[in-house]
Image (cartoon, rainbow, N blue to C red):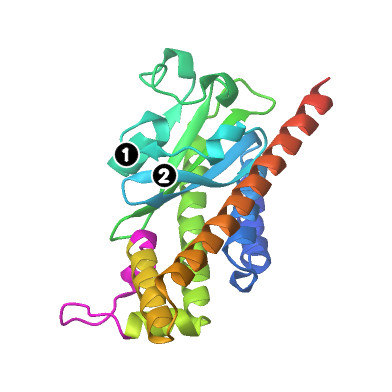
Amino acid sequence: MNNQSRALLDRFAALSEELDPANGLEPVLNMLAMETARILDAENASLMLAQGDKLQVHSHHGRMPEEAYNGVVRKGEGVSGHVLSTGQPVFVENIEESPFSRSARYPASSGKSLMSVPLSTQEHAIGVINVSCPRHRNAFSEPDLKTFRILGRFATTIIQATQLRSMLHSRFAITALATTPHSGRDIRVEDIHDPEKLSRILAKSFYRELRQMGFSPPQIINSASEIISELSDSLRNKKELSHKNNRKQDEAGK
């Protein structure tokens, strides 16, 4: 085993201890993006989670257009959408000379070299992770892609473990799943890792609970509005953080 391989294994071992699912999903995703950029010596990294046939950015390191957090990438659209659709990684030495030159969503900020790999289980893809702008070299290499694919599998495992732990520590979620009809079958682990299906189950259960507790339709609408307000605050905070990180990078580059 050469020194580079040994260093990579040591970093994976350290990450296994640092990435604590007990901290919740958002800190885990943020650290995964940061460590991906660090291990691959890239300026930018982003982690996108799938919601049906769409992808949305949930964490990033480096430069990221503010609108990226509000937008979605559809299956088959651009580099990330292509990875979600095919389940195969993409390795691009120069985006301007690749088949994705016209479909890339943010070509000006992505650098000329980039890589994208799926976050996949045996059942379905749960997301995509991307890196761009390799440091101290013109383009990523095939060994970089091999390392990135290993990182993708590692990230998938960590994300699933975090989601499962969150579910097991939520009495409401456990009750919602236990009382939801499942067409005569038991709940599968895959159901827990399907955000779109799980969100519908929890939303319907939340509605039933409010109705059983005697809340009126206007009060239930107020509850839904509060959820939307919390989500808006979260998205605004992410945009502000992205703007701050971009400004720091601009100042560092001067």
User: Residue 187, relative to residue 221: is it above or below?
Assistant: below
Residue picked out by circle 2: 55
**Foreground pick, 88 / 250:** 250
Local packing at callout 1 (Cα closer than 10 Å; few below 14, some 14-19, many 20+) is some
User: Residue 213, relative to residue 10: is it above or below?
Assistant: below
Local packing at callout 2 (Cα closer than 10 Å; few below 14, some 14-19, many 20+) is many
User: Residue 41, relative to residue 254: is it above or below?
Assistant: below
- Residue 5 in view: no
> Do the residues bearing badges 2 and 1 touch, measured as CB atoms within 8 Å?
yes
| 245 magenta-colored | no
Q: Secondary structure at mark 1?
A: loop
Q: Residue at x 65, y 41 (%)?
A: 239
Q: Which mark is residue 75?
A: 1
**Residue 177 image point, x, y percent:** 35, 80
Task: Write the start and end of the magenta stretch as one range.
Answer: 179-196
Q: Amino acid at mark 2?
A: Leu
- Residue 107 in view: yes
Q: Residue at x 66, y 56 (%)?
A: 11
Q: Residue at x 72, y 32 (%)?
A: 246
Q: CA distance from mark 2 to mark 1?
A: 8 Å
| 180 magenta-colored | yes
Give the side of residue 32 with respect to residue 170, left or right.
right
User: Residue 176, relative to residue 156: is it above or below?
Assistant: below
**Residue 38 image point, x, y percent:** 67, 43
Residue at the far left in the pictured view? 184
**Residue 9 image point, x, y percent:** 61, 56
**Residue 254 image point, x, y percent:** 84, 19
Give the side of residue 10 with respect to residue 150, left or right.
right
Give the side of residue 13 with respect to residue 191, left or right.
right
**Foreground pick, 233 / 149:** 233
Q: Residue at x 65, y 60 (%)?
A: 27
